[in-house]
Amino acid sequence: MPNCKHACAPVPTVGELVPVVMTVNGFTVQAEIPVDLLLVDFLRDYLELTGTKRGCGDGDCGACTVLLNGEAITSCVKLAIQAHEQEIITVEGLASGEELHPIQEAFLEVGAVQCGFCTPGMLLSAKALLDQDPSPSEDKIARHLAGNLCRCTGYTKIIQAVQLAAQKMAQL
Amino acid sequence: MVGYSNPRNLQEVFAAMLKSPYQLVAGGTDILVRKNKGLLEFSHIINLLNVAELQGCTCGINGSVRLGALVRHADLVKDGQCCKVARALTQASQEVGSLQIRNLATLGGNLCNASPAADTATPLLVLDASFELVSSQGTRQVKATDFFVGPSKTCLQADELLSAVLIPVSPVLACGSAFMKLAKRKALAIAVVNGSAWVQLEEVAGEIRIGQARVAMGSVAPTPVRLPDLEAWLKGKPITASVLAEAGKLAETMVKPIDDIRSTAAYRRFGTAALVEKVLAEAVLHAKEGNYA
């Protein structure tokens, strides 16, 4: 992704424009954004990275989860300007070209994706966990995904997918 | 027009505050929720995340614990030393929101938002904490017990902000604390009731008794509250199952919960009795491990 100024029509907000620079999925991006722009809207509307979903708008569902400096956060309650000079990973940053991340492979193999709306957030929360603990217990996985709600799957296969992902990553 | 300031220290914060009206934003997990719901209009945003004096956490067994207002719940959960000294607070931070919220939200923000259900409030009430408040006029300290004055209301004056939380460390061993939260979900839930206890044990004629106790409850009154009558009753009591059960029953008579969307007054009274009994028992166990605070 090249350096970009905001190319597409942004979400209308009222305010001064401020310069922001951040690293997103390994690329440096810079833009002039309204002060009150949310990180989720910056990612979706300015960078056209629509993998991050807006589920509730109040930090309660986890669909907007991204990694900020390696830690899972809900981007709908984070101002984009407060992520200035920070590192963001979105779901689009997991695969390397056509090669899926082991966590993505695991979700597909196990069948942990139904409507898919919670999935980007789940993948990133799982990545944050596995990066810190390569072999978490089932209980720990459940606790670490507690901030990501799923209305379709009942969570069982999601947890199995994370366990499988841990095995896959251990073999790398 | 929504303006923006990104101060690096308190002096720059006070200068930015001259652009009245302003909105301080730290973690943003309360403020941005209100904004997203249309309950808050931004004026001039002052980003607090880079303010040096608000950061950091110093813990020691010989002095008080100083937590900068910007310390996140995630930091409190991770910090092993603070965990030993201020156990109830660490337990409470673990229960706030979700992992994602804990990675954003600050201790100072949780306290200044001043919900009667604030998870970090009752631990600080029983740990006898003080809050450091700063303004361009200077610094003052207030006891945690004087900080919360109403639902979502604190004693912060105009243009004043909370810079640090100070927790005294007991010079005597055999203190323990615990926190508990009753809620409808394991995460992302505002407490139906929450509460904390702190005890200092003493030995009297070979028997271990409660030397001193502090108990606080949240979500049962307009602010998080200490229960001084219960504390007086507990002083000197032996530690038996019936004493703890009676403490719970007494606590139930001392709180004034209401019916709201989360629960009923009746359930909250019932919850208070159970919670106080359990949290005292846990604080005693912690004290028996020979811990400070």
Image (cartoon, helix red, strand yellow):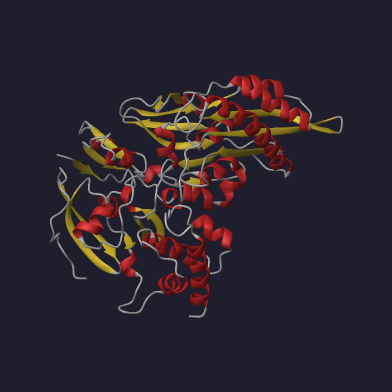
Residue at 60 percent of width and 23 percent of height:
B227
Whether B27 is drawn above or below B252: the answer is below
Q: How many marks?
A: 0
**x and y percentages locating residue B65 in the rendered image:** 54, 41
Query: Residue A72, located in which quarter of the rendered image?
Result: bottom left
Whether A156 is drawn above or below A101: the answer is above
- Quadrant containing the C terminus of chain B in the rendered view: top right
Query: Residue A119, located in which quarter of the rendered image?
Result: bottom left
Residue at 40 percent of width and 71 percent of height:
A104
Residue A155 visible in this rendered orientation of the protein: yes
**x and y percentages locating residue B139 in the rendered image:** 40, 30
**x and y percentages locating residue B184 in the rendered image:** 52, 41
Residue at 70 percent of width and 33 percent of height:
B200
Q: Is residue B105 left or right of residue B293?
A: left
**x and y percentages locating residue B12 in the rendered image:** 27, 40
- Quadrant containing the N terminus of chain B in the rendered view: top left
Query: Toward the viewer: A39 or A56?
Result: A56
